[in-house]
Every structure is written in structure tokens, then in C-alpha cells.
């Protein structure tokens, strides 16, 4: 017959053993693990210590068996604690990584750079606005052109020097990077009948050696007006108005006779050098002349009208092609056209639309 003290001790040990089995599943953090270790193995008040003290109450003949059971519980407690510790150690790196990627609201926020329009684009919009106010529409066309649109329909004779490789970047026998925005005049006049009042901003390409006022890729803005009774006076008045709105009422502008195959008569337009104020004989922008050419212009040649089936007896027109970069240099006070194309954000960020 087993001693009643032994039975009672066995029941308590079984209860503690069940508690250990549950803890093996449930404990998820080092703090609970430490509490469990103290609960079972603390030398003063731990379950195992108290059970060893209780051995004193067990009958002499059952002591050996009772001692074996308490020792077994001690071993079980130790191995459960070790197993939980191992499991927590394995999960620790993942938990740490989780903590690292969690947002820390005390840190300064990450700066997200704002995209911004390029200074040339901003200036282009300024010119566009002036023309839109006057009732012009905006058109565009392809940057890769055929010989017909870039030269032929614009009345360039087959042996014109502009067609040779010093100026033109060919990408095929009949295909080239357009050297000016004028081919879009032809494309629009082929499709539309007068009255026409358009501007055509866009990129153009030339085989140039870059210098402070020349780039191999730059922007032009073409203008074209076709209607009955259009004269050179309209061209002059319009351009003077636009340039004065851009640069101020007192800005000096001059028209010089010139030649383009697709306009007759033709004129180039200069403005006073706003870089040196016409004062520096060594100015790198105007070369000391005090003037800088900004556009070519003229009355549309009757032959061009014939090429697109517009009656030159009834209609007349004018056109111009201005260098957006050159004007932007003056407007923004930039001494070298190449700054526009260096993609230096410290430069680009200085400009906002006025
Ligand atoms: C032309 O390109 C003509 N298509 C302009 C035209 C249009 C005349 C309509 C008549 C009627 P030109 O090659 O001169 O012309 O160029 C026009 C303007 O582009 C120049 O006045 C200048 O402001 C600018 N430009 C020319 N070459 C460069 C370059 N390499 N870099 C920057 N700007 C340039």
C-alpha cells in the first residue's frame, strides 16, 4: 500500500510536469522564460527546492521513490527551460530585423526630391504664353525628318551646303535629325488651309563644335502666319512686341538683311548683348560686337506656297525660327549655353517660372 504522502507528492509533481509541458508551447519571450526558471529552480522558493523539503514528510520506505520523482521533475524542468531558450534564440535574428525595419518616428523624415521643369522648358513656356495670348496655336512634328521636309519642300537647291555633312546629322540615305523646326511649316501647310497662325517649339540637331553660344542639340521656336494681306510690317511688329515683352521695353532689337531659301526677303534679328550690356570688347557671348543673333525670319517664298498647294497670288505669310537657348541665356543671365545640358542639379534647381 503506497504512503498517502507519496501519493499526494506524486499528484503535485504531475501537475508541475503538465505546467512545464504547457510552458514549452506558450512561452514566447525571454522575460517569461526567466520567470519560469525562477518558479521551478529558484534556490529559495522554487518548486524543486520546496519539493525536496517536502521529502521530509514522506514515509521512510517511500523516500527513495519520492526523491527519484523530484529529481526527474528537476531534470525535466531543466530540459524544458533549455528547449525554450534555444527556440527563442533561433527566432531572435528575425525579430531583431523586424524591429530594425519598423519606422522610427523620432528620426528626421526622408527628403524626397521634387521633379522640376528644366530652365529651358520654363523659358519656352514663357514665350509660348505670349504667342498664345496673341491667338497662335502650338504645333509639333518629328525630330527625324526626310530630305523632302527638312530641305526639298523648303526650296533648298540639291547642292545647298546645309545638306552636306558639316551641318546635318544623317541617320539614313534619306533620313536625318532635323536641323531646324521649319519642316513642320510644310507638314502643317500640307494639311491645313489659311488662315494659319502657329508656333512650333522643338529640338533640333546640327553637327556643331560646342562653344558658349553653340550646341549640337538645341531648341528652336518656329513661327508661321499665312493669310491674305500679310506683310513684313506684321512680322517686324510681332517680333518686336514679343522681344520687348520678354526682355523689357527698352531692349534694342535690330533687323539685318539675310538669306534663307524658303523666305524672300529674309532677315536675321539681333538683340543687344544682355550679357555685357554692349560694354565688354572681350565678351564671350557677343564676341565684343554688342549684338547677338537670336533668330532668322522672312516672308514665305512663293515657291514654298506652290510646294504645298497654297495660292501665292492670294495668300502671303511670314515665318521665323528663334533659338530658345540663346534667348534663355539672356533672360536667365547664363553666360554659356552648355550649362543647360550638363544636368547639374545645382544649376537646374535655381530657376522657377516667373
Ligand atoms: C534657321 O534654322 C531657320 N530655319 C530659321 C528661319 C525660320 C528663317 C523661318 C526664316 C524663316 P538659323 O540657322 O539661323 O536659321 O537658326 C536660327 C536660330 O537658331 C539662330 O538665330 C540661333 O538663335 C539659333 N541657333 C543656331 N545654331 C545654333 C546652335 N548651334 N546652338 C544654339 N542655337 C543656335
Image (cartoon, rainbow, N blue to C red):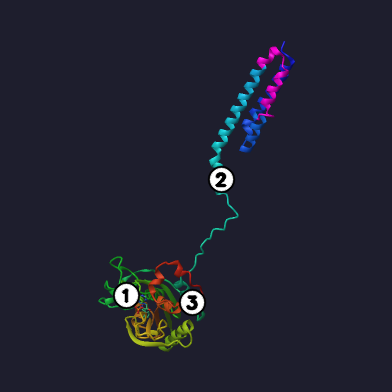
Q: Position of residue 87 (x, y in %)?
A: 56, 34
Label 3 vs 1, first from the N-terminus: 3
68 to 267, vertically: above or below: above
Q: In terms of image quadrants, where is residue 48?
A: top right
The quarter of the picture where the N terminus appears is top right
Name the one closer to the observer, 82 or 203. 82
The circle drawn on residue 339 is none
* Residue 20 in view in this figure: yes
Q: Position of residue 236 (x, y in %)?
A: 42, 87
Q: Residue at left 45%, top 85%? A: 238
Residue behind mark 2: 98
Marks 3/2: CA–CA distance: 51 Å
Q: Residues within 10 Å of mark 1 (few under 14, many from 20)?
A: many
What is the magenta segment's predominant secondary structure?
helix
Please, what secondary structure does the residue beneath circle 2 have?
A: helix
* Residue 189 in view in this figure: no
Marks 3/1: CA–CA distance: 30 Å
Tell me: 260 left or right of 2: left
Residue behind mark 3: 126
Q: Is 302 one of the magenta-colored residues?
A: no
Q: Residues within 10 Å of mark 3 (few under 14, many from 20)?
A: some
Label 2 vs 1, first from the N-terminus: 2
What segment is highlighted magenta in the picture? 42-65
The circle drawn on residue 151 is 1
Ligand 1 quadrant in view: bottom left
Label 2 within 8 A of ligand 1 by Cβ: no
Q: In terms of image quadrants, where is residue 323?
A: bottom left
Amino acid at each position: 500500500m503506497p504512503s498517502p504522502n507519496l501519493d499526494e507528492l506524486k499528484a503535485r509533481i504531475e501537475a508541475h510536469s503538465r505546467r512545464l509541458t504547457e510552458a514549452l508551447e506558450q512561452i514566447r519571450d525571454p522575460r517569461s522564460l526567466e520567470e519560469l526558471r525562477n518558479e521551478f529552480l529558484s534556490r529559495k522558493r522554487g518548486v524543486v527546492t520546496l519539493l525536496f523539503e517536502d521529502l521530509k514528510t514522506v514515509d521512510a520506505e517511500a523516500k527513495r521513490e519520492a526523491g527519484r520523482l523530484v529529481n526527474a521533475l528537476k531534470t525535466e524542468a531543466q530540459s524544458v527551460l533549455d528547449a525554450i531558450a534555444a527556440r527563442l534564440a533561433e527566432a531572435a535574428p528575425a525579430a531583431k530585423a523586424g524591429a530594425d525595419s519598423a519606422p522610427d518616428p523620432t528620426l528626421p523624415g526622408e527628403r524626397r526630391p521634387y521633379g522640376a521643369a528644366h530652365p529651358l522648358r520654363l523659358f519656352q513656356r514663357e514665350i509660348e504664353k505670349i504667342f498664345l495670348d496673341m491667338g497662335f496655336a502650338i504645333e509639333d512634328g518629328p525630330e527625324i525628318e526626310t530630305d523632302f521636309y527638312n530641305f526639298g519642300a523648303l526650296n533648298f537647291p540639291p547642292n545647298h551646303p546645309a545638306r552636306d555633312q558639316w551641318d546635318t546629322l544623317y541617320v539614313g540615305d534619306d533620313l536625318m535629325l532635323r536641323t531646324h523646326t521649319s519642316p513642320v511649316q510644310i507638314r502643317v501647310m500640307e494639311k491645313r488651309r489659311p488662315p494659319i497662325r502657329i508656333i512650333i517649339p522643338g529640338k533640333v540637331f546640327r553637327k556643331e563644335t560646342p562653344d558658349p553660344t553653340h550646341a549640337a542639340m538645341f531648341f528652336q521656336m518656329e513661327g508661321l502666319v499665312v493669310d491674305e494681306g500679310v506683310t513684313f510690317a506684321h512680322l517686324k511688329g510681332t517680333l518686336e512686341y514679343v522681344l520687348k515683352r520678354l526682355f523689357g521695353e527698352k531692349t534694342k532689337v535690330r533687323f539685318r538683311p539675310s538669306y534663307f531659301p524658303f523666305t524672300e526677303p529674309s532677315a536675321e534679328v539681333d538683340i543687344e548683348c544682355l550679357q555685357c550690356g554692349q560694354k565688354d570688347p572681350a565678351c564671350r557671348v557677343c564676341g565684343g560686337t554688342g549684338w547677338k543673333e537670336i533668330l532668322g525670319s522672312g516672308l514665305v517664298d512663293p515657291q514654298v506656297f506652290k510646294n504645298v498647294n497654297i495660292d501665292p497670288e492670294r495668300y502671303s505669310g511670314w515665318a521665323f525660327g528663334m533659338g530658345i537657348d540663346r534667348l534663355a541665356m539672356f533672360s536667365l543671365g547664363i553666360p554659356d549655353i552648355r550649362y543647360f545640358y550638363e544636368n547639374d542639379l545645382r544649376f537646374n534647381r535655381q530657376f522657377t517660372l516667373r
